[in-house]
């Protein structure tokens, strides 16, 4: 039997960023490992520049997510006022944003950002390396009830709309723990768990699945929060018919 910490993720908007290229800031269709571990770090009061504590989170905990409602993707446009590189070269050292804008010769950069709207999912973590895991699952649950820093769903402009209702479940497999969590699931008035849901999980855990799964490459392993560097990992995907389990 294993212990799993599960919590709900819902908000009108979320931004689970993928690889940023040029002016496009895309979003994954589901929560990323880095975003969920970031929420845990915020709840526990771990600063982004605390590299050792962030590395322990990365090494110490496994991650999975079950998507209950896919939601819809929305694209937003941002404008950023800047100055040309030619003007910047005229000044050896720019101390502040005001210094930069006082150079004149301003121009506007247009960027696009994707947001996931009305997405509902359940995140799950477990201890995979006891030496690196500095916090018990029960301590993580308590931290979510009184978080040290504000929680958000990938981007600071996307706070959760409801409490995450974190709890610890003991079960013999990941699938069984997820099913236990969504039994009698009460998230929003009128929300009904669909008959078929998507489960994404990592290596090294008893998933409880017999059917074939798909392997996906995803870049959301945390290398450095302060330098914003990530690495690839393997993520496995399967669909579960919930109506047959509940």
Image (cartoon, grey):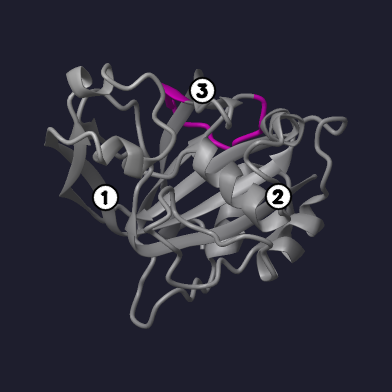
Write down the residue under mark 1: 115
Residue 155: within the magenta? no
Write down the residue under mark 2: 4
Q: Quadrant of residue 198?
A: top left
Residue 172 location, x and y as percent? 72, 45
Residue 104 location, x and y as percent? 17, 36
Indicate left or right for 3 with 221 as reference.
right
Write down the residue under mark 3: 229
**How far apart, in angstroms, are the residues tagged by discs 2 and 3?**
27 Å
Tell me the residue at 52%/61% (across/down): 8
Circle 3 SS class: strand
Residue 139 location, x and y as percent? 80, 57
Indicate left or right for 241 with 86 as reference.
right
Q: Nearer the viewer, mark 2 or mark 3?
A: 3
Which range is magenta?
A: 204-219
Magenta stretch, main secondary structure, is loop
Q: Residues within 10 Å of mark 3 (few under 14, many from 20)?
A: few
């Amino acid at each position: 039997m294993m212990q799993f910490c599960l919590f709900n993720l819902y908000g009108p908007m979320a931004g689970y960023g993928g690889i940023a290229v040029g002016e496009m800031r895309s979003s994954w269709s589901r929560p990323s490992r880095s975003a969920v571990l970031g929420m845990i770090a915020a709840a526990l009061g771990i600063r982004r520049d605390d590299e050792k504590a962030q590395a322990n989170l990365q090494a110490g905990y496994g991650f999975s997510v079950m998507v209950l409602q896919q939601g819809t993707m929305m694209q937003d446009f941002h404008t950023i006022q800047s100055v040309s590189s030619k003007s910047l070269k005229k000044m050896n050292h720019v101390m502040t944003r005001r210094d930069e804008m006082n150079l004149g010769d301003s121009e506007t950069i247009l960027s696009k950002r994707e947001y996931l709207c009305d997405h509902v999912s359940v995140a799950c973590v477990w201890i995979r390396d006891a030496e690196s895991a500095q916090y018990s699952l029960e301590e993580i649950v308590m931290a979510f009830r009184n978080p040290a820093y504000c929680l958000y769903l990938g981007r600071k402009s996307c706070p959760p709309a409801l409490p995450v209702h974190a709890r610890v479940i003991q079960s013999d497999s990941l699938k069984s723990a997820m099913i236990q969590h969504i039994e009698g699931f009460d998230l929003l008035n009128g929300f009904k768990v669909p008959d078929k849901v998507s489960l994404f999980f990592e290596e090294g855990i008893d998933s409880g699945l017999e059917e074939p799964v798909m392997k996906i490459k995803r870049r959301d392993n945390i290398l450095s929060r302060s330098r914003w560097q990530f690495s690839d990992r393997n993520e496995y995907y399967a669909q579960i018919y919930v109506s047959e389990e509940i």
